[in-house]
Image (spheres, grey):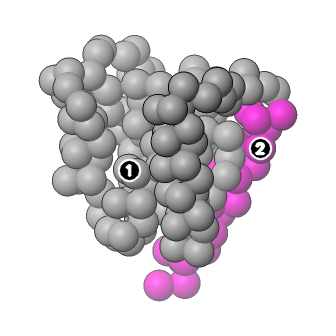
Amino acid sequence: MHIWVDADACPNPVKEILFKAAARSGTKVTLVANHPLKVPPGDLISMRQVPGGFDVADDEIVARIADGDLVITADIPLAAEVIAAGAYVLTPRGESLTKNNIGARLNMRDFLEEMRGTGEIISGPSPFSNTDRQTFANSLDRLLTRAAKSANSA
């Protein structure tokens, strides 16, 4: 398993959790962003800078993922592409997006975008909290444990 991070809008606490998880589990992590990001030294964590532009980082992730990889993103259309390609998706708030729930999330995203387009005032997401951080860490740990068990039984 390789972890790909849609890093432009990924909260720093999530990146720190990923860095620690990479060291603990030996899992490679690649951050993809349109601006340079600092990453810890070593072979497990890398940063791939892409040119600025609409969905350039998303396209880079989709082009590089393999079946069974994990993508960290809050971008619902990207998540749908990743799931269709056979990879796993975890949001920075720890929600696992799957074939079973991505359709509903896409519908909600489209509805909210339509409401914003009509001038309705719709608040954005709540600030990233310590609860979100813990939920993400727990969800990531479950996924990594499951992946390790699968690798050991293969």
Whichever of labels 1 and 2 marks the residue nearer the N terminus, that label is 1
Task: Examine the rendered structure and indicate whether residue 48 appears above or below residue 107.
Answer: above
The percent coordinates of residue 134 (x first, y second) are 79, 38
Q: Residue at label 2?
A: 135
Count residues near mark 1 (Cα–Cα under 10 Å), then give few for <14, some for 14-19, many for 20+.
Answer: many
Residue 96 in view: yes
Count residues near mark 2 (Cα–Cα under 10 Å), then give few for <14, some for 14-19, many for 20+.
Answer: some
Q: Is 131 left or right of 90, judged from the image as shown?
A: right
Instruction: Find residue 112 and report its image quarter.
Output: top right
Tag 1: amino acid = Leu
The percent coordinates of residue 35 (x first, y second) are 29, 16
Which residue occupies the extreme left position in the image? 51
Membership of 132 in magenta stretch? yes
Residue 45 in view: no
Q: Is 91 left or right of 142, judged from the image as shown?
A: left
Secondary structure state at the residue bearing disc 1: helix
Membership of 76 in magenta stretch? no
Q: Is 142 left or right of 92, judged from the image as shown?
A: right
Q: Residue at x 48, y 62 (%)?
A: 88
Q: Residue at x 26, y 37 (%)?
A: 55
Q: Residue at x 55, y 84 (%)?
A: 153
Task: Examine the rendered structure and indicate whether residue 72 appears above or below residue 39.
Answer: below
The percent coordinates of residue 97 (x first, y second) are 57, 60
Secondary structure state at the residue bearing disc 2: helix
Q: Is 80 left or right of 14, judged from the image as shown?
A: left
Pair 1/2: label in front: 1
Q: Residue at x 22, y 45 (%)?
A: 59
Q: Disc 1 and disc 2: Cα gap in Å?
A: 21 Å
Q: Main secondary structure of the magenta part?
A: helix
Q: What span is colored magenta in the figure?
A: 131-154
Instruction: Find residue 43 and report its image quarter.
Output: top left
Q: Residue at label 1?
A: 78
